[in-house]
Image (cartoon, rainbow, N blue to C red):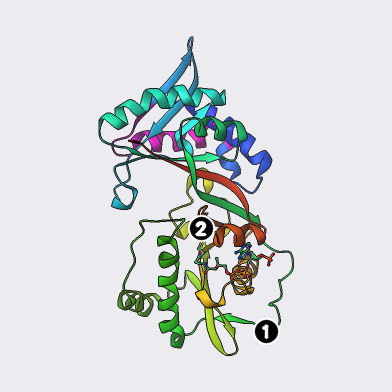
Amino acid sequence: MPAAAALLAERHRQHRLRHPLLPAAYEDQQRALAEVTAAWESEDASGTVLRDGDEVTGYLLGAPKKSPVWGPNIWVEAAGHAVREAEHIRDLYGAAASTWVDGGRIAHYTLVPDDAALLDAWFRLAFGSQHAHAIRPVPETPIPVPAGLTVRTAVRDDIPILAQLDLTLPQHQGLSPVFSAGMLPTLQEALDEWEEDFDDPEHVTFVAESNGRVIGSSIGSSIEKGSTHSGLSQPDNAGFLGFAAVLPEARGLGAGRALGEAVLNWSAEMGYDSVVTDWRVTNLLSSRAWPALGFRQTFHRLHRLIGH
Ligand SMILES: CC(C)(COP(=O)(O)OP(=O)(O)OC[C@H]1O[C@@H](n2cnc3c(N)ncnc32)[C@H](O)[C@@H]1OP(=O)(O)O)[C@@H](O)C(=O)NCCC(=O)NCCS
């Protein structure tokens, strides 16, 4: 485990040369060891280790997630792999995956830093890109709202349109080419959730108006409130753009940018250093909108489905 932690700390040090906003702590081997240990202690974790003589030169650890949306799965989290030579991830996976597939776990997911050699090695294991994690610094000065749009914090009277907008994200992501299996709540469920959570002080909700009508919404929070970004992929003192949606007929006109920038401005006001978001790379809208707002990809979630 300490040898694996040393490899992980070095991988993270290299990663931070490209993304200094990622958390510095995991360059420390003791902190990296806590992450490797957590991966090892995850329920039903298994994996492989590579040795060159007495020296550990790579490791791979995966564990299943319980949610049915991922299928019969194995997840390799950010701390679940590190190798001295990128090519060797293929040997580690080759040895680990036979156990996973024999056990019926044919949907594989892995969170990989944006390291070209490492991504290439995973691609040559038949993985493809599914999801992006990204970061940007907060703006130095507030970004103004463009003419013709109003952006304001939501009020209780907005709940009906907020609930409608909640459905537009899973509706869009259920379509081609995302084909996400995410659950689509009913409008009533979305309304009930808003009634219950509206005053939650840990989130801020913005709405965009055009001609006096709400056409979109976005939600900001601390990065610590979400579960997608943890450990090595959770920057210190960061805000989180956790949700944004614009009504289909109002898309492509700048409302999404204004709503994303409202969360950037809010994050700066809250004293955060950076803002994190994530998107399905097959979502043709968000995968273009968020990089246009200055978000740079840090991790790639790769996916492979075995059997065909
Ligand atoms: C993603 C979404 C919120 C963006 O809002 P939008 O109002 O459509 O986007 P905007 O018009 O503000 O455009 C934002 C940027 O993305 C770019 N963009 C938007 N649509 C694009 C397209 N079809 N092709 C290329 N670029 C596009 C724009 O060029 C713009 O950058 P620019 O200001 O530098 O030109 C909206 O499309 C949406 O609700 N999509 C469905 C739900 C969803 O995917 N939510 C995000 C979940 S992660």
Image position of 59 (left or right of 24): left
Q: Using the image, determine if residue 287 lies above or below residue 129.
A: below
Most foreground residue, 52 or 86: 86
The answer to whether mark 1 and mark 2 are in CB contact below 8 A is no
Most foreground residue, 10 or 159: 159
Give the CA distance from mark 1 to mark 2: 27 Å
At a point 45% along the width and 56% down the height, the residue shown is 178
Question: What is the secondary structure assignment of the residue under circle 2?
Answer: loop
Q: Is residue 266 visible?
A: yes
| Earlier residue among tags 1 and 2 | 1
The quarter in which the C terminus is drawn is top left
Is residue 272 in the magenta section?
no
Label of residue 283 in the image: 2
Pointer 2 local density, CA inside 10 Å: few below 14, some 14–19, many at least 20:
many
Q: Position of residue 206 (x, y in %)?
A: 54, 76
The quarter in which the N terminus is drawn is top left
Nearer mark to the viewer, of 1 and 2: 2
Q: Residue tagged by mark 1?
A: 148
At a point 30% along the width and 31% down the height, the residue shown is 101
Label 2 is placed on what type of residue? Asn
Q: Which residues are magenta?
A: 27-47
Image position of 258 (left or right of 69): right
Q: Is mark 2 within 8 Å of ligand 1?
A: yes
At a point 56% along the width and 26% down the height, the residue shown is 86
Question: What is the secondary structure assignment of the residue under circle 1?
Answer: loop
Query: Which of the 4 image quarters holds residue 160?
Result: bottom left
Label 1 is placed on what type of residue? Gly
Q: Position of residue 134 (x, y in %)?
A: 58, 52
